[in-house]
Amino acid sequence: MVSFPSLQHALIFILLGGLGALALDKYTAAVYEHAVILAETTEKPVSPEDALKLMNQNMDVLEDAIQKAAKQGAHIIVTPEDGIYGFFFTRETMYPYLEDIPDPQVNWIPCTDPKRFGPAPVQERLSCLARDNSIYVVANIGDKKPCNDTDPKCPSDGRYQYNTNVVFDSDGKLVARYHKFNLFMEEHQFDSPKEPELVTFDTAFGKFGLFTCFDILFHDPAVALVTQLSVDTILFPTAWMNVLPHLTAIEFHSAWAMAMQVNLLAANTHRLSRNMTGSGIYTPSGSQAYHYDAESENGHLLVAEICSRRSCSPTYLPAINWSLYATTIEQFPETHTFPGIVFHDEFTLSNLTKEAGNLTVCQKTLCCHLSYRMTDQREDELYVLGAFDGFHVAEGDYYLQICTLLKCGSTDPQSCGQSTTTARSHFDFFSLSGTFSTNYVFPEVLLSGIHLAPGGFQVLSDGRLISQNGTSQALLTVTLFGRWYEKDSPPMHIHSITL
Ligand SMILES: *[C@@H]1O[C@H](CO)[C@@H](O)[C@H](O)[C@H]1NC(C)=O
Ligand SMILES: *[C@@H]1O[C@H](CO)[C@@H](O)[C@H](O)[C@H]1NC(C)=O
Ligand SMILES: *[C@@H]1O[C@H](CO)[C@@H](O)[C@H](O)[C@H]1NC(C)=O
Ligand SMILES: *[C@@H]1O[C@H](CO)[C@@H](O)[C@H](O)[C@H]1NC(C)=O
Ligand SMILES: *[C@@H]1O[C@H](CO)[C@@H](O)[C@H](O)[C@H]1NC(C)=O
Ligand SMILES: *[C@@H]1O[C@H](CO)[C@@H](O)[C@H](O)[C@H]1NC(C)=O
């Protein structure tokens, strides 16, 4: 006679064995940069029917991208923040676009059971797109949750409105819901959840986590997902406004993936009038595919095969100590310095006066060391080494430590830090390092014309950002962008709220 428990044991064994066999070393990822169609009016509330009509127009475009991605074998596709309803809303005019999005634990396939939680036409359509094309679909929509006087934080209009990422698996089941925690300044139409949510889900092609846009600049939930929950891939819908020289989308997002040693699938909204462009499929080795288009008004699909586990990346480093090299060498001679404003922050700058050299620039506790060799020093271009150690207070409030090699706008020292998109000077060697107080430092290399340099530079485990052989195009900037999270005010706590 076979006893029940041992039969169960056998079943569990077979199931686990089966999963092991199905687990994939690689998978195909897709991101879609979508030129969102905006509502005609965001000042007066529209009817739910008109709201749905606009959202369906955007989903028609997303449907085409999802079908194309699936045809190319993609397992998952990420679409942008605000990609279905756009922006410029007030709380009130946002409301007709919102749906009640249940906790994924309810085990729901909206495509086959659309009315289970009241009307949810957007979730139904996204679920069907995932199911019909056998692909995971990641989208950003709005969630509404009623509240009342029993909750002292309940807004006066009696509801919470959340900027929300949803994920439907390849059967159309809702498997993840994430409420954006770090809202950007102008997002008055939304509320922050009381605590940052650490949302993850498992697949045969790795463990996934998700967050949204401005979240990437903060510790929670972004860093916690990687360091505490060990996700392999981050799903990242964004509506990112590019800011030169250090915060263009492709530059910062690829650097984040490299420093955190994680895959990052970044889908940006495409809207040039708001400086929104730049999406990519980034890995610990750098960019596998990226898109930046400051010319056309078109959307764009990226598809690339990447490692399922972050540890299988060829350049995976278990730990980088970002200050190790800089704190153990002799400081190079300090040269004449001057102040310069970069995105509202006052940096300490020093000219690169020679064709090759070693120099150090310090501000407060941060000293930045640069060794470099230029192939030709042009008379009409000025490069500086800069250091910044302090609070950044424009469009957000967060503590930075930055070391940067920067091309100035012109040969006028006043122009250093102004946005400039082209350069002609080539470096055949550089090595940048800094005495960082934080171990969260994002290595950026941006080339003339707003290009990334995959394979053109390396990060060493002692914290040096180096290029032995130079980059394919002239340099706009080489930067170690450090975030000292503990110094942020109010202090961020470590939370462990898991779905
Ligand atoms: C108030 O909100 C709580 C929590 O959402 C809910 O359980 C309760 O039924 C609500 N009360 C009223 C009167 O709506
Ligand atoms: C877009 O970028 C340009 C150049 O950096 C800047 O002058 C302009 O103000 C930006 N536009 C917006 C909407 O931020
Ligand atoms: C990095 O190296 C420095 C110098 O050896 C050391 O003081 C520091 O504790 C190390 N940091 C980490 C995070 O291991
Ligand atoms: C920079 O320093 C290195 C040793 O740290 C030395 O080999 C090199 O010659 C120096 N370069 C210049 C141009 O001074
Ligand atoms: C830096 O270089 C610029 C352009 O050559 C020059 O105008 C300026 O005086 C230099 N500054 C210092 C401090 O050497
Ligand atoms: C640099 O170029 C040399 C000669 O072409 C080559 O041997 C070396 O591997 C290259 N180094 C890197 C880091 O790409």
Image (spheres, rainbow, N blue to C red):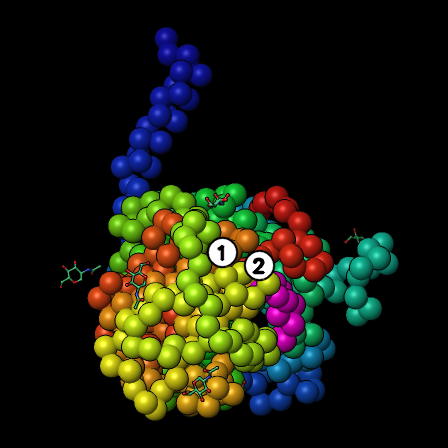
Q: Residue furthest right?
A: 149
Residue 330 versus residue 267: which sits nearer the camera? Answer: 330
Above or below for 15 versus 424:
above
Is residue 93 found left or right of 83 in the rendered image? right
* Residue 461 percent across, percent down from the top left: 36, 49
Residue count near mark 1 (Cα–Cα under 10 Å), binned few <14, some 14–19, many ≥20:
many
- Whether residues under marks 2 and 1 lie with C-beta atoms below 8 angstroms apart, the answer is yes
Q: Where is residue 372 in the image (x, y as percent from the top left)?
A: 32, 69
The amino acid type found where label 2 is placed reads: Thr
Along the line of sight, the residue nearer the viewer: 73 or 356? 356
* Residues drawn in magenta: 389-399
Can the viewer see residue 175 in this picture?
no
Bin the neighbour count of mark 2 within 10 Å (Cα to Cα): few under 14, some 14-19, many 20 and up: few
Location of mark 2 (residue): 365
| 436 drawn magenta | no
List x then y, in percent, for residue 5: 44, 16
Residue beneath disc 1: 435
Residue at left 63%, top 67%? 391
Marks 2 and 1, how far apart at CA: 8 Å
Q: Position of residue 70 (x, y in %)?
A: 30, 64
Label 2 or label 1, whichever comes before in sequence order:
2
373 vs 176: above or below: below
